[in-house]
Amino acid sequence: MSPAFGFALDQGQLVSLITFFLVCLLLVGTVTALNAAVDLLLVEIDFRRGAQIALGQLALWQRLRRMPSSPAGTRVLKEYSVMKPMR
């Protein structure tokens, strides 16, 4: 004769089980929100780094355009004009 399988929870165990699942969902939601915030922060940092590099390239280009009279300035200006922009 096989034993009968029964599943019985009293009120205290049921409240504990429901509380456990709610806390688990809250933790999953918190970790998901933090992950999304970190992703947005990394995208913003990458965007600002790109903008900073672009500003540096623009400043260098403008500085080099003002001094083409020297041979070194002309050579650097020619080399810089064929460079591809960094991404």
Image: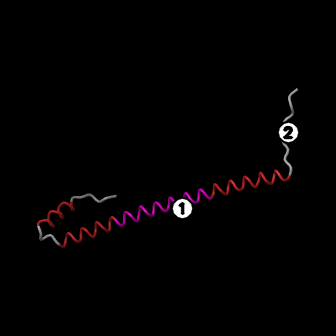
Labels 2 and 1: the sequence-earlier one: 2
Determine the image quadrant of residue 8. Answer: top right
Q: Can you identify the residue that label 2 sits on?
A: 6
Measure the alpha-carbon separation of dots 2 and 1: 46 Å
Asked if the stretch drawn in magenta spans residue 35, the answer is yes
Amino acid type shown at disc 2? Gly
Q: Please name the residue shown 45% across and 60% down the image.
A: 43
> Magenta: predominant secondary structure element?
helix
Marker disc for residue 19: none
Residue 39 in picture, x, y percent from top left: 50, 58
Mark 1 Cα shell of 10 Å, populated few (<14), some (14-19), many (≥20): few
- Measured along the vertical axis of the image, is residue 28 above or below residue 48? above
Q: Secondary structure at mark 1?
A: helix
Tell me the residue at 27%/70% (across/down).
59
- Using residue 8 as the reference point, say whether residue 61 is left or right of it: left
Residue 76 placement, left or right of 36: left
| Image quarter hosting the N terminus | top right
The mark tally for this picture is 2
Instruction: Locate residue 32 relative to residue 58 in the image: left or right.
Output: right
Q: Quadrant of the C terminus?
A: bottom left
Q: Position of residue 62 (x, y in %)?
A: 24, 71
Question: Which residue has dot 1 on it?
Answer: 37
Q: Amino acid at mark 1?
A: Ala
Q: Tell me: 29 left or right of 46.
A: right
* Residue 63 at x, y percent in the picture: 22, 71
Q: Nearer the viewer, residue 9 or 80?
A: 9
Question: What residue do we see at 18% from left, 63% from top?
Answer: 76
Q: Which residues are magenta?
A: 30-52
In the depicted structure, whether residue 39 falls above or below residue 7 = below
The residue that appears at 21% across and 58% down in the rendered structure is 82
Kindly give the residue lying farthest to the top in the view shown: 1
Q: Secondary structure at mark 2?
A: loop
